[in-house]
Image (cartoon, rainbow, N blue to C red):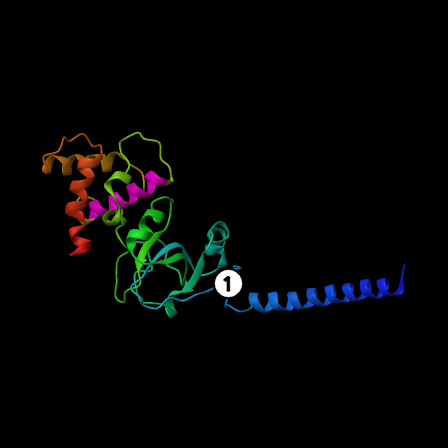
Amino acid sequence: MRRGHLIAVAVSALLGVACGVVGGIVLDRHRGAYPDPLRLGVALVNQPCTHETLLVVARGNGSAQLGATVASEQDVHYLDTRDSCPTAWNDPGAEVGRYAAYLGPYNSPTQACPVRMTRRGGFVTRLVSGTTEPVQCLCYLSFASMPTLRSGMDPNAVTSAYVRSLQRLLTTLHLNPETHKTGIYDVQTVEQIRRFQHDHALPPNGVVKRATWEALVRQGCAHYTS
């Protein structure tokens, strides 16, 4: 092998090592460029009151409560509620925690709510100071996207999300106890729907379809949008 070729190979090897070292330093600096006090591998990004919307996917005081959710999500961050907008950081009935893992921000509930209704857990909140309740997503969805709910249906992530939101809406209408938000279309929910249908000149069959959805949203959402 010629001497010039040996020199070229040696120089290339040295450059490769040097680039690797520099790249590793840059990567380490990038990894350390954001706070991650819970060591979840994602950024802690606190949120001020911007009037935008977040989808909160987990709450807790440490990595034990947030870790599994964060690991399963894409484009997720978390925040410290003590250093973020004083808004509704807790889904009613859920355990309160200092930290919240979230998706977003979104410009409005119209963008966040369709994402929320495809998952079993989580809630939507506005970054507006003094907000006391999570967003009622039924008020921001198209009727065409709402599933038919009936007794005996097979539960899944979508129907569970809709049933929980429905039960919350029935609470707003003084038809459902505050503590009854199971996500299950049970006998109690069927009876509440029958009562609502009877009072609004709808067939009292306990099945929530387009006409019943429209009446429920028209009556219940007046509380949230007024």
Tell me the SS state at disc 1: loop
Whether residue 61 sits left or right of residue 88 in the image: it is right
Residue 102: say if magenta: no
Residue 97 sits above or below residue 204 on the image: below
* Magenta part of the chain: 158-171
Residue 99 sits above or below residue 156 on the image: below
Magenta segment, principal secondary structure? helix
Residue 32 sits above or below residue 105 on the image: below
Residue at point 25%, 51% (across, down) = 136
Residue 169: say if magenta: yes
Residue at point 31%, 63% (across, down) = 127
Residue at the disc numbered 1: 38
Q: Pick the residue in front: 7 or 208.
A: 7
Residue at point 18%, 29% (across, down) = 205
Please state, as top left, top right, bottom left or bottom right, where the C terminus lies in the image: bottom left
Residue 76, position as x, y percentages in the image: 45, 56
Whether residue 33 sits left or right of residue 164 in the image: it is right
Can the viewer see residue 166?
A: yes
Residue 12, position as x, y percentages in the image: 77, 64
Q: Is the residue marked by circle 1 packed among few (<14), some (14-19), or many (20+) residues within 10 Å?
A: some
Q: Pick the residue in front: 78 or 89.
A: 78
Mark 1 is on which residue type? Leu
